[in-house]
Image (cartoon, rainbow, N blue to C red):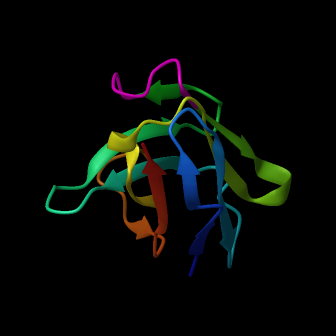
Amino acid sequence: QVQLVESGGGLVQAGGSLRLSCAASGRTVRWLVMAWFCQAPGKEREFVASISWTGGRTIADSVKGRFTISRDNDKNTVFLQMNSLKPEDTAVYYCAAGPRGPPYDLWGQGTQVTVSS
């Protein structure tokens, strides 16, 4: 069974950057679609970005030009580089994985990102 563990969250000022990591253990995720979602207090979970096993990327319009998703298959890890952060980016960020994209059947526990104004 694959386990996903996110890290890299924290408190940052508006305009700053964070790099989130999602490390998979149990088996390779090389052939899976990996994605990031976020959930702000009182809101539903939202799609942020995804990356296929071939490297094809999909980015939500709200973060396009600021966030970048990448993966290192040798390290079984997916990254979310978050630049020019805004207070509205404050949320718990979750890593997800699936064989063909949504619905994703594997989820991490989440990492908190807080952006202060």
**Foreground residue among 111 and 3:** 111
Is 71 situated left or right of 50 in this image?
A: right
How far across and down, in percent of the image, does residue 96 sit? 46, 59
The residue sitting at the front extreme is 117
| Placement of 102 over or under 56, stated as above or below | below
Quick check: is 97 in the magenta stretch?
A: no
Is 61 situated left or right of 50 in this image?
A: left
How far across and down, in percent of the image, does residue 68 sit? 60, 31
How far across and down, in percent of the image, does residue 13 sit? 55, 45
The residue sitting at the right extreme is 74
**Residue at screen point 68% across, 66% down:** 23
**Residue at screen point 48% across, 47% down:** 35
Residue 37 seen by the camera: yes
Quick check: is 64 in the magenta stretch?
A: yes
Is 43 situated left or right of 53 in this image?
A: left
| Placement of 65 over or under 18, stated as above or below | above
Q: Which residues are magenta?
A: 60-67
How far across and down, in percent of the image, does residue 64 sit? 45, 21
**Residue at screen point 58% across, 61% down:** 9
| Placement of 48 over or under 38, stated as above or below | above
Q: Main secondary structure of the magenta part?
A: loop
Which image quadrant: the N terminus?
A: bottom right
**Residue at screen point 68% across, 79% down:** 26
**Foreground residue among 59 and 43:** 43
